Amino acid sequence: MGFEVLLKGNNMIRLLGGLAAALKISLISVCISLIMGTVFGSLMNDRHPLIKKILRAYLEIVRIMPQLVLLFIAYFGTTKALGVNISAEAASIIVFSFWGSAEMADLVRGALSGISPAQYESSLALGLTYHQTLVYIIIPQIIRRMLPLSINLITRMIKTTSLIMMIGIVEVLKVGQQIIEANRKNYPNAAFGIYFTVFVLYFAVCWPISRLSRYLEKKWEA
Amino acid sequence: MLSPYCDSPANSLVCKEWVIKMNEILNINGISKKYGDLVVLDNLSLKVKSGEVVVIVGPSGCGKSTLLRCINALEIIDDGEVALDGKAINPHDKNLSKVREKIGMVFQSYELFPHKTILQNLVLAPVRVKKMNRKEAEKEALHLLERVGLLSKKDNYPRQLSGGQKQRVAIVRALMMNPEILLMDEITAALDPEMVREVLEVVLDLAKEGRTMIIVTHELQFAKAAADRMVFIDGGRIIEEGEPKEFFENPKTERLKKFLHSFTYE
Ligand SMILES: Nc1ncnc2c1ncn2[C@@H]1O[C@H](COP(=O)(O)OP(=O)(O)OP(=O)(O)O)[C@@H](O)[C@H]1O
Ligand SMILES: [Mg+2]
């Protein structure tokens, strides 16, 4: 079935190393996206009409453009157009954060707009300060609304890191291809074993995350 | 500010007299409120004595909700002054929340906190604002829940309650702060008819025990039963006010006559 090739040399370690490279990029990007998304999202309301328009346009662009195109622009484009040389890793982090921040901003905006002004008012009327109202009333509700959706976004970001091999980063899929290439003669069936393992690795990372989201969703629904 | 006699219904009359003798606690003095060119409150004045139940009626859009919201500075008035216990409320004061603590408010749409259980809804403000001991707050909450017949719902979430139950919890939540005055804005307007009564009975109870309240309502029967004084507002002004009996049976102004007439069917 082609699994034997995994045991040869340090192939399994190399695959895991590729996974780590992908996870590192997604982790950094997710953190940046959470922060920037929260900032952008809280600005996307009618109190800031101009900022809202700009951020909407930004979100549209991110949604229209395939991530791969963004990667090529960030990696090859900047070198050609601006003469700066950024590493493939930096380019990936920029693109993934650019994408994640926009999507996260939209989630924050949606969660915020779903909370009626009267929730603030009933809290203020009880004598809570504005700050206490945010901490005890508004933010917990926003987190509950957002968490399942943001986890979904995070798993999408992790999966999409498989694209970064296109700009030369040796992530798990690339390592897999290398192993298959190198063992074409001795293990002609390697492709199935390797790709299946890659699948299992992605599954092992994303499944617990989406279980967590399901669990929280259930718990807060109770 | 309740008398020590106020905890039993048998004493409610004594209690009421005791409290009404006290001076006014709320003084609304010539307030005006505009939204753009629209004048919603027009130099309106109203005084409320301790223990008094003032019921406000008036056509839709006449400014009733706005009036209540100006009292606890959810809206900022353009002119005039609202004073609680003789002290003007300044909406820009850093200690505004200290004043709001003393003014309970119940909303038409309940506005319970959906992520908290009933008990958590009730103890949040006493614990966080009054720095009350949590155990004590819970004891008080359970006591009040029992009074409104909702003890069994203490660990439920708001969405598991009917409208009438939610509104009773919202009233209890306001009571937990032991406010000097309670503002109620059409608290039965969103309820199914069969639930109106269970809520109004709680309010009548509060009236009997001498709570100071300003109640906005379209339930005229209830108004008659609960009010010490009726106030009719139209176009952002008080058109007529008086004792409930006179008010309903002998309205003096044409506008009030017409308004009351609009509730009858022939
Ligand atoms: N935030 C606002 N901006 C602009 N106009 C407002 C605002 N809030 C209220 N108004 C207007 O002020 C007027 C008075 O509103 P208010 O809600 O006080 O009336 P109401 O007497 O409570 O009516 P109802 O019986 O329908 O509740 C209405 O014409 C309303 O459209
Ligand atoms: Mg109203």
Image: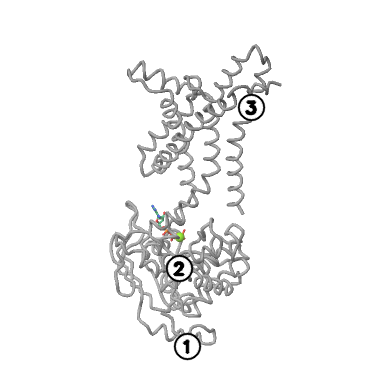
Q: Amino acid at mark 2?
A: Pro
- Quadrant location of ligand 1? bottom left
Above/below status of B155 relative to B136: above
User: In this rendering, does residue A86 appear at all?
Assistant: yes
> Dot 1, crowdedness within 10 Å: few (<14), some or many (≥20)?
some
| Residue B14 - label | 1
Could you confirm whether marks 3 and 1 are on the same chain?
no
Residue A203 placement (x, y as % from top left): 62, 33
The secondary structure type at the circle numbered 2 is: helix
Q: Chain of mark 1?
A: B
Q: CA distance from mark 3 to mark 2?
A: 56 Å
Apparent side of residue A217 relative to residue B233 in the rendered image (left or right): right
Residue B98 placement (x, y as % from top left): 36, 67
Q: Chain of mark 3?
A: A
| Residue that mark 3 sits on | A197
| Residue B126 - label | 2
| Residue B244 - label | none
The secondary structure type at the circle numbered 3 is: helix
> Dot 3, crowdedness within 10 Å: few (<14), some or many (≥20)?
some
Query: For this rendering, which residue is in front, B70 or B111?
Result: B111
Apparent side of residue B133 relative to residue B192 in the rendered image (left or right): left
Quadrant of the rendered structure where residue B67 is?
Answer: bottom left
Residue A119 placement (x, y as % from top left): 46, 56
Q: Check the image and name the residue furthest to the right.
A: A1
Q: CA distance from mark 3 to mark 1?
A: 83 Å
- Ligand 2 near label 1 (Cβ, under 8 Å)? no
> Dot 2, crowdedness within 10 Å: few (<14), some or many (≥20)?
many
Could you confirm whether marks 3 and 2 are on the same chain?
no
Q: Residue at x 42, y 86 (%)?
A: B18
Q: Residue at x 35, y 71 (%)?
A: B46
Q: Amino acid at mark 3?
A: Thr
The secondary structure type at the circle numbered 1 is: helix
